[in-house]
Image (cartoon, rainbow, N blue to C red):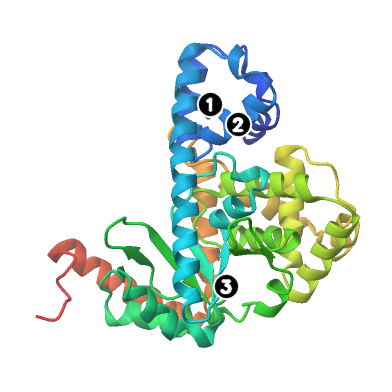
Amino acid sequence: MSQFTNQQLANFLTKPESAIDLPLELWAKLILIFRESKLLASFYHVSKAKKCYELYPKYARKHLYAAFIHAQRQNAQVLFESENVRVLLAKIDVEPIFLKGANYILRESENSRGRIVSDIDVLVKKEDLDKVEWTLKSALWQSEKLSDYDEKYYRKWAHEIPPLFHLLRETVLDVHHNFYLPVSGRSPNVALLVSNVETSKSGCLVLGNAESVLHSIIHLFMNEDFTNAFRDLFDIHLLIKQYESYDFWKNLEVLAEKTKFQKELYYCLILLMKIFGSQEPPILANLNLRYKTLRRDFFINTILFNSLTPKHSLLNNYLNSTSRFLIFIRGHWLKMPIHILIAHLAIKSYKGTLEFFFGKYFLDEK
């Protein structure tokens, strides 16, 4: 049986004072879940903001503080690497726009406090990709050796080049030219999402308020991997809470319509109300008229809801696992036309089987 529901976990994040009287046994489980979900440092910050951190047991405080120190170090590293990338690409007259975790940290949004990132994401113009990649590789950024097929996947079908890592610092950098895979037929017009960029204190370009929220929604609901989905939904909750106003909601509604991601926006708003108890937004009435059906209600309230449950042994059950598997299938279905998807899965399965039995480098040229 799951130790906590999604609503209970969300309640700890939005009302951290509710954790004060937790017995130590449940504290230990909550800490394990939030650490695995990359939310432990965020929990530290919300508890400090609500002035209840000092009321937690010493056992809990030391874990939360350790998570805070780790997140602070990573925050500083993101700022350092972002500035380095900005200065490096300025030499070839390219201004990268920073996305996702780096975007939050650079713009100092509420959800950046304690935010853990696995890589730094930047967006550049597609026509600049070759010179950007050459410039980065000349400055000790390199990519892992990939098979010819994987290279083709990135170069022909994906919205990014193969991930780069720094040879000395091992930082991972993802260079995008779009917000979603062009092969899917659903990649948005980039100009719509970069028409309102802002400049951070350090001089780095970041997305505007509504654009940041919509990109977070696209990244969450068009993905096949929901490992960090609960954290990502909390990101969106905090962003909306910080930026919401009449103009914000209007801009977000228009942007979603122009980029054709209104359905994903609808999913997100329903789940924010269901899990985080968000107030009904003013744009929901129009979305309800367009997207509310019994089939979609089932998809949102069962499949998406259970897939969002943090992936941890203390929470895993048959319904969560099945829902995540269905989301995995759906995510791949969204990424590619059926004829490409079938070929892609067949090739990846074949390669995976050979590598399992004969080793990772069996297919490399001898």
For mark 1, does the 10 Å Cα neighbourhood hold few (<14), some (14 to 19), or many (20 or more) residues? some
Residues at marks 3 and 2, CA–CA distance in whole angstroms: 32 Å
Position of residue 262 relative to residue 238, above or below, is below
SS of the residue under disc 1: loop
Q: Amino acid at mark 3?
A: Tyr
Horizontal side of 97 relative to 240 (left or right) equals left
For mark 2, does the 10 Å Cα neighbourhood hold few (<14), some (14 to 19), or many (20 or more) residues? many
SS of the residue under disc 2: helix
Horizontal side of 229 relative to 209 (left or right) equals left
In-front residue for pair 284/237: 237
Residue 343 appears in the picture as rendered: no
Q: Are marks 3 and 1 in contact (CB under 8 Å)?
A: no
For the C terminus, give its image quadrant. Answer: bottom left
For disc 2, the marked residue is 45
Position of residue 30 relative to residue 283, above or below, is above
Q: Amino acid at mark 1?
A: Gln
For disc 1, the marked residue is 3
- Which tag, 2 or 1, sits closer to the chain's start? 1
Residue at 14% in and 81% down: 365
Q: Amino acid at mark 2?
A: His
Position of residue 38 relative to residue 349, above or below, is above
What percent of the width, then of the height, locates residue 127? Answer: 52, 88
What percent of the width, then of the height, locates residue 95? Answer: 56, 74
For disc 3, the marked residue is 180
